[in-house]
Structures are given as C-alpha cells and as structure tokens.
Image: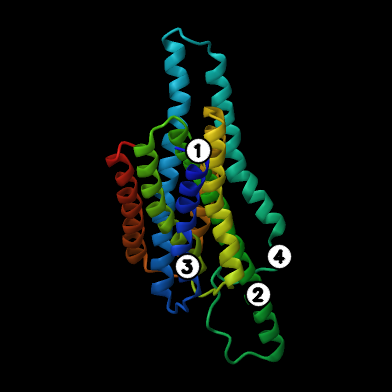
Amino acid sequence: MSFLETLLLGAIAGSTIYLGLPLGRVHWVGDRTRVALAMFSVGILTFIFMDVGSHAESIVAAALTSYKAHQSSLGPVVGLFLMLAIGFTLGTAGIASIERRLRPGATAPPILGGEHAARLTPQELAAYRDAESQARRRALQTGMTIAAAIGLHNFAEGLAIGVSAKTGAIALATVLVIGFSLHNATEGFGIVGPLGSIRPSWRWLLLAGLIGGAPTFIGTLVGYQVQSRALELAFYSLAGGAILYVVGEIWTGMRRYGHRTLGLCALSVGFLLGVATDLIIVLGGG
C-alpha cells in the first residue's frame, strides 16, 4: 500500500469522530437526560481505558517473556515499566495539577449549571451568573481534556494502521480502518456527553474533533515511517491515565443529580458499544 493511500485511510479513520460531536449542539434539558448521556460517555471511556491498559500491559509483558526466554536482559523490562508508570502518573496527577491551576478560584455550582436563578436579588443574580460562567468554562475544559485523552489513544491506533500498511498487510489495515472509524464515531459522544446543558460553539466542536481525531492521521504517518513499541507504550500510558482522571471527574459531577440506576444502565450501554466496535477489528484479525 502506498504512502498516500495509507494517509487517506488514517484521515478517514480519524474524521469519523465528527459524527458524534454535533450532538453537543442539541439543547438537552432535564437531569435524567444529562445523567444518561454523561454516563453513556463514561461507559465508552471505560472501555477505552480497558483497551489501552491491555495494550500497554502486553508491551511490557512481551519484554518480560523475552527476558524469561533468555533472549534479552532485564533492562528493557524495567525501562518499559518505568515508562508506563511515568506516563500513567502524568496522565492522572499531571492533568489534575494543570486543571487545578486553570480552575477559577471561586466556588462554582454543579459542573453543568442549574435552573434556579429565579427570585434572586440583583447582587445574588450577578454572583450566580458569574458562577454559571465558571461552570461553563470548567465543563468545556473537561470536554477538551477528554478530547486530548482520546487523541492520545487514537495516535496509538493510527500507529497500528501505519505499521500494517507498511508491512503489506493491506487486508488488516483496511479492517483496522473500518473498526477504528466506527469506534471513533462513538468517541464523539464521549467528548460532548459530560457537557449536558452546556451548548458548545461550532468552533469548539471543530477544535475538539481535531484534538481527538487528528492524532489518528498523525499516528498513521508515524507508524508508516517508524516502528517503535516504546512509542506506543508512551501514548497508551498517557491516554490510560488521562481517561481514568476524566472518568473520575464525570462520575463525581453526576452523583449530585441522582438517577443512579439510569446512569449505570447508560454506562453499561456505552461500554458494550465500545466492546462491539472493537470486536469488528478482532473479527477481521486486527
């Protein structure tokens, strides 16, 4: 498969993230809808966390197997594990530290705002609107953090497409593109789900799609040129840590709305949808 054909496949796989993003422009109302959509996205993110964790662990395990077979030293195993630990820590505590610095100092209301601004004095109304503005900024920051975490995951997926095309496994590369395209379409829901009643601009959605989807294309480009398990591990570990942090943030934000059973059902649906799209890749031998 030629270089240009490979880049086209990577672009197709990455662009499908925009199929789910326009949902963020729909004016969703009601706590039940907010909880269901946000927890659906948590289900998708939970699957992605499981997926990247499995891939990262397999890279370290492969090095350990090589050591057990006396084919390599213990150094690569220790090095890869340290890379995994550093990447995962940067993805969790690192992002938490950055977001804490960016977060406004004033106490904000629930992440998705509220509808109780009536019957307030002018001073109280001004304070409430300021808090609403802070809540909106924080919600959009959370959504962009999700896009960045998904982008790290998609970069590693792009590497798989590029490597398969470079080695001449055209059928496998094609199946990977189909599977990743379907999977990336669900990731769009994962980005906008936690926004709830917050309605992002088209510019924000475009940027979120680029951050989340473009790494698939870039990963395809890199994978076609360079084959590095250490590079894959770095992005898998960063993605895993970031996704775990985001899941915790969304879960905490949704607890105040109640509807626990509905939320858990939506989480299950999102997780199973992620599994179903991944099985398409497995079915094709990816």
Q: Hey, which residue is sitting farthest left in the picture?
A: 283
Say what amino acid the circle numbered 3 marks. Arg
Tell me the number on the disc at residue 256. 3
32 vs 282: above or below: below
Cα–Cα gap, marks 4 and 2: 10 Å
Name the residue tied to disc 4: 104
Q: Are marks 4 and 2 in contact (CB under 8 Å)?
A: no
Please identify the quadrant where the N terminus is shown: top left
Give the residue displayed 50% in from the left and 38% down from the top: 159
227 vs 106: above or below: above
Give the residue displayed 64% in from the left and 68% down from the top: 137
The local crowd at label 4, few if under 14, some if 14 to 19, many if 20 or more residues have their Cα within 10 Å, is some
- Is 263 or 212 nearer to us in this picture? 212
Q: Marks 4 and 1: which is nearer the front?
A: 1
Tell me the number on the disc at residue 133. 2
Q: Are marks 2 and 3 in contact (CB under 8 Å)?
A: no
Cα–Cα gap, marks 4 and 3: 21 Å
Mark 1: secondary structure: helix
The quadrant holding residue 173 is top left
Say what amino acid the circle numbered 1 marks. Leu
- Specify whether 216 is left or right of 36: right
The local crowd at label 3, few if under 14, some if 14 to 19, many if 20 or more residues have their Cα within 10 Å, is few
Cα–Cα gap, marks 4 and 1: 37 Å
The quadrant holding residue 50 is top left
- Is 246 or 120 nearer to us in this picture? 246
Mark 4: secondary structure: loop
Percent x, y for residue 45?
44, 52
Say what amino acid the circle numbered 2 marks. Ser
Percent x, y for residue 63?
47, 20
